[in-house]
Amino acid sequence: MKPAPFAYLRPATLEEALAALAGEQGAKVLAGGQSLVPLLNMRLAAPSMLIDINALPDLGHVRVAEDGVRVGALARHAEVLGSAEAEQAQPLLAMALRHVAHPTIRNRGTTVGSIVHADAAAEVPMVLRLLEGSVDVASVRGRRTIPAAELFAGPLESTLAHDEIAVEAFFPALAPGAGVAFQEIARRHGDYALVGVAAHVETDGEAVTRARVGFVSVSDVPVVVDVTDAVQDPAGDPAATALAELDPAEDIHATAAYRTHLVKVLAPRVLAAATDHARSRAG
Ligand code: FAD
């Protein structure tokens, strides 16, 4: 299928892009196009104008500092995945990105675009929530930082205002004594997950002081559940704790019962792996 007609703008500066976005209610930002273009072609979106941000300067960075990893709006998934420094600072990002689509799509799709697209079946939005990261956004009105906990409003809906462009995502570094793990089940590697689960565990010596689990493709927004009490209780059941807060959906890819089963299998596995990871880093 072909998209409905639209105007196309490729601004050379962020200021120009923000002014154009503020001036055209029906405009949409085009980054890697790996989610937006299929929506246009299927006519599930019909913006009056596409504002292509690919010519904007200074947005292609993957910058690693002591506090974490900063990913610019034009950094492709492949560039983030290719950064050994980023993987060292926050291994969960690379663990999850290896499951995002295929190399051709990762070469073009942006990590920030995936976050703004806010697909509950996508790995990166959940990882940003689990790590308690944030996104910096700009508009003609100024700049603000949106914490990941306030970023996802509903299916394919972020809390960015229409005139805002996300310029950078921040993934906090893995603290000493903390560990992470990620696993997902998909029909083929690179397909969207039937269910994906990540864990972030904090330890003090042998004791687990905090344990949280994040889920992909289970609800209509990325969900994170605190399972610390269930992990600390020898009779606790972290998967049951998580499922009490989840409502796995049924669709053409999997039944709700199958998704529930995958949560029960994967949650204990990633929690065990993240705990081992934390202890191996402490030791
Ligand atoms: P675009 O498609 O350009 O934009 C997506 C949306 O975000 C649009 O609404 C756009 O207006 C908005 N947007 C983008 N950037 C900004 C910005 N900086 N500021 C404001 N708004 C912005 N993803 C996964 O997570 N897991 C998968 O397994 C997976 N499999 C895929 C398989 C296929 C066959 C394809 C085609 C895609 C797949 N994807 C998958 C999606 C891919 O990761 C996309 O690249 C990503 O979701 C969106 O990034 P993009 O740069 O292409 O954004």
Image (spheres, helix red, strand yellow):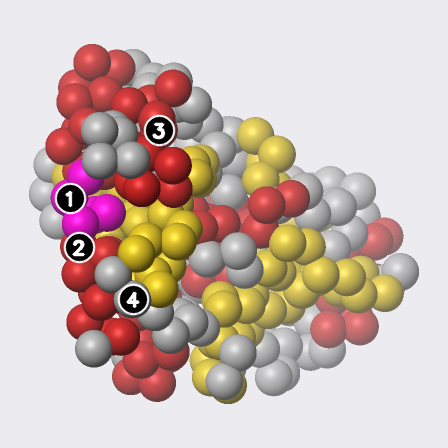
- Amino acid type, label 1: Arg
Q: Label 1's element?
A: helix
In the image, what residue occupies the spot 31% across and 80% down?
88
Compared to residue 122, the image places residue 104 above or below, namely below
Q: Tell me where the magenta segment starts and ends, as one range.
A: 268-272
| Image coordinates for residue 227, horizontal then vertical, percent | 37, 38
Q: Nearer the viewer, mark 4 or mark 1?
A: 4
* Quarter occupied by the N terminus: top left
| 154 horizontally vs 127: left or right | right
Q: Which residue is mark 2?
A: 273
> For disc 3, does the CB lie below 8 Å from ligand 1?
no
> Is any atom of residue 151 visible in this view?
yes
* Distance of label 2 from label 1 (alpha carbons): 6 Å
Q: Which residue is mark 4?
A: 205
Q: Quadrant of residue 253?
A: top left
- Amino acid type, label 3: Ala
Kindly identify which numbered label has been placed on residue 269: 1
